Amino acid sequence: MAVGRDAVSSWGEQATRALAGAGFRRGGARAAVIDLLDRQDCALSAVEIEDELRRHGERGVARASVYRILEELEGLRLVSRVEVGQKLARFEPSRPEGHHHHLVCHECGQVIPFEDAGLERSIMRLSRRMAFDVEQHDVVLRGACRDCAG
Ligand SMILES: [Zn+2]
Ligand SMILES: [Zn+2]
């Protein structure tokens, strides 16, 4: 269990507190984006976030606002960015307990999450070998998914 972290509160609660602490006002758009991200296990694009908010009957949150809020959250290390190519990015909540990596298909743009204990151990070994205190890491493997290969 991470020290100094409130293990009971959800990512959404932590994000709301961190934004308030950084002096951002609690707006309807911020709350809506945080609520939506809090329900995600993996990454969404800004367009998907915008569509999803509209589908759930939130009053529309303009795409520019979605981008701005994502930048605020990224700046506070509350979301991490997954680059999927063609300058497209996806965003997901940074949760220590849901740590995973991504396969990105360069044909259809699909993003497939994966976990690999061996990979995590390799990164820790590398950290010791290089005497470098690795605080976070992300791994993106690019290629063709099952549907697009061959
Ligand atoms: Zn993910
Ligand atoms: Zn594909």
Image (tube, rainbow, N blue to C red):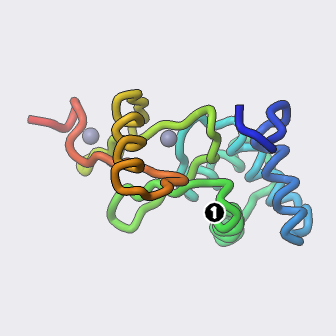
Residue bearing mark 1: 74
Tell me: residue 16, above or below residue 25.
Answer: above
Ligand 2, seen in the image, is in the quarter at: top left
Q: Quadrant where the N terminus lies?
A: top right
Q: Which residue is at a point 48% across and 37% down the rendered structure image? A: 100
Q: Which residue is at a point 64% across and 41% down the rendered structure image? A: 95
In this picture, residue 85 sits left or right of residue 135:
left
Element type at mark 1: helix
Q: Is mark 1 within 8 Å of ligand 1?
A: no
Amino acid type, mark 1: Glu
In this picture, residue 136 sits left or right of residue 35:
left
Nearer to us in this view, 16 or 77: 77
In this picture, residue 109 sits left or right of residue 136:
left
Q: Which residue is at a point 56% across and 54% down the rendered structure image? A: 80
Is residue 90 visible in the rendered structure shown here? no
Give x and y (percent) for residue 8.
84, 31
Q: Quadrant where the C terminus lies?
A: top left
Q: Which residue is at a point 41% across and 27% down the rendered structure image? A: 117
Nearer to us in this view, 8 or 70: 8
